[in-house]
């Protein structure tokens, strides 16, 4: 009996050893980042990142992303990046087994640049293509370092999106809170520019600018109320949509922050301390507005009072997207989110913050999501695929061009 068990264990070990690692090449080009990643995968284990590259369009001169300029940028960069990987990782001898590429949502020209290149690679190497939903990448990249269990919540905050999503499975996602106007990252960028802060990624520059304010000054700023102009800076700023009742549709709104700065500048000007004060307050209020709305959603879908208990079994809250890398934001989330509204034992609700380098757009997240689709759904994308500008998260499979991968092809990739 013992021998039998031993031989079974040996056979299993041998099967694992002989099971081939398969390699995945991933491309992301939905906005202004040209990204490429090579991942390695053993079934039932998290993917391993072998290599990744990212080149970002510098939009300092244009003051924002100009879509045709972004297309030229991707066309200049993506092919040379693939060529670099081909030489470095010997793709001519052994090409990757699977190609994953962002299909949408995003800017059509930018998406097309990556998708066309991916199609060419699939034809040349005779490999399947997986057209990946960009937001699914932002959510699933957390699986590299942790194991979120469905149902879980994701708070996605970046230059292109701000949303709270409830995920019940790989393909079942419900957007609980979305923005009614612009995305939080866009708002931070615009406010930073209006305040005279310079750089390429202005939201990041704003964070650095606020961090550099001396601590005593920050404490002073924190104590100043701005509900009216009756303060030393004559600056009025309130947190939008702060009403006591729970609305039918819970939304974020970020457009008013910029107009507050514009109004103040035109009426009162902007000396150095006022610039610091406005930057400090705007950044904090933007983050607190997100927290306000998420807390309202917790209340509406939580376990207290009239809550509909939709979030009852949620144990993980993923916070991802470029803005999620902001340390002030992370601290405020930890301090001010009312986790007790959704769980009897709030200590059991775990925050998952993907590594900062994975919070901004990257190809690793596209590879991770593509692998999940390949292994769980065994689906690939037909080469007639077109990019999708707006692709709702609750319609991952409800778009054309998905098809089943024949079982023998799945096995030929996963096994020897
Ligand atoms: Zn993104």
Image (cartoon, rainbow, N blue to C red):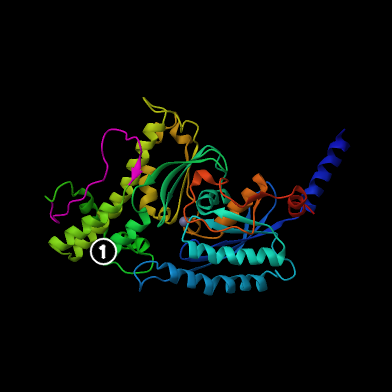
Q: Is residue 90 left or right of residue 235?
A: right
| Quarter holding residue 40 | bottom right
Residue placed at 86% from the left, 41% from the top?
Answer: 7
| Quarter holding residue 268 | bottom left
Give the extent of the magenta segment. Answer: 231-252
Q: Badge 1: few (under 14), some or many (20 or more) residues near its Cα, within 10 Å? A: some
User: Which residue is labeled 1 in the image?
Assistant: 194
Comparing 123 with 384, the one in front is 384
Task: Please indicate, yes or no, whether residue 130 appears anywhere in the rendered image.
Answer: yes
Residue placed at 34% from the left, 35% from the top?
Answer: 248
How many numbered discs, if any? 1
Q: In this view, does 269 lie to the left or right of 314?
A: left
**Residue 5, image x and y in percent?**
84, 37
Q: In this view, does 260 lie to the left or right of 354?
A: left
Task: Please indicate, yes or no, whether residue 57 appears anywhere in the rendered image.
Answer: no
Q: Main secondary structure of the magenta part?
A: loop
Quadrant of the rendering where the C terminus is positioned: bottom right
Comparing 302 with 102, the one in front is 102
């Amino acid at each position: 009996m013992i021998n039998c068990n031993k031989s079974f264990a040996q056979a299993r070990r041998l099967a694992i050893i002989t099971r081939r690692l398969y390699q995945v090449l991933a491309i992301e080009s939905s906005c202004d980042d040209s990204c490429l990643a090579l991942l390695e995968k053993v079934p039932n284990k998290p993917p391993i990142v072998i290599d990744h590259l990212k080149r970002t369009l510098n939009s300092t001169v244009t003051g924002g992303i100009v879509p045709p300029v972004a297309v030229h940028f991707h066309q200049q960069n993506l092919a040379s990046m693939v060529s670099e990987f081909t030489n470095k990782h010997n793709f001519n001898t052994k090409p990757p087994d699977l190609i994953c590429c962002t299909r949408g949502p995003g800017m059509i020209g930018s998406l097309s640049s990556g998708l066309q290149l991916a199609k060419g690679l699939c034809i040349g190497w005779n490999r399947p293509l997986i057209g990946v939903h960009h937001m699914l990448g932002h959510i699933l990249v957390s699986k590299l370092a942790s194991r979120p269990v469905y149902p879980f919540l994701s708070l996605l905050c970046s230059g292109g999106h701000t949303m709270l999503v409830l995920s019940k499975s790989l393909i079942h996602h419900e957007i609980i809170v979305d923005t009614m106007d612009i995305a939080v990252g866009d708002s931070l960028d615009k406010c930073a520019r209006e305040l005279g802060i310079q750089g390429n990624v202005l939201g990041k520059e704003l964070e650095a600018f606020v961090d550099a304010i001396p601590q005593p000054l920050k404490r002073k700023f924190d104590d100043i109320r701005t509900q009216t102009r009756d303060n030393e800076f004559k600056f009025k700023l309130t947190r939008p949509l702060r009403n006591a009742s729970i609305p039918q549709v819970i939304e974020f709104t970020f457009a008013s922050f910029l107009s507050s700065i514009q109004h103040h500048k035109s009426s009162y000007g902007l000396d150095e301390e006022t610039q610091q004060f406005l930057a400090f307050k705007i950044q904090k209020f933007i983050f607190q507005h997100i927290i306000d709305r998420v807390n309202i959603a917790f209340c509406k879908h939580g376990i207290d009072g009239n809550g509909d208990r939709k979030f009852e079994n949620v144990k993980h809250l993923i916070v991802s997207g470029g803005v999620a890398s902001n340390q002030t934001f992370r601290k405020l989330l930890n301090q001010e989110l009312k986790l007790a509204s959704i769980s009897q034992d709030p200590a059991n609700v775990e925050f998952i913050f993907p590594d900062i380098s994975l919070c901004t757009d990257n190809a690793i997240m596209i590879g991770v999501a593509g692998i999940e689709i390949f292994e769980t759904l065994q689906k690939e994308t037909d080469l007639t695929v077109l990019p999708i500008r707006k692709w709702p998260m609750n319609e991952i499979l409800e778009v054309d061009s998905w098809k089943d991968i024949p079982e023998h092809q799945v096995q030929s990739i996963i096994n020897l």
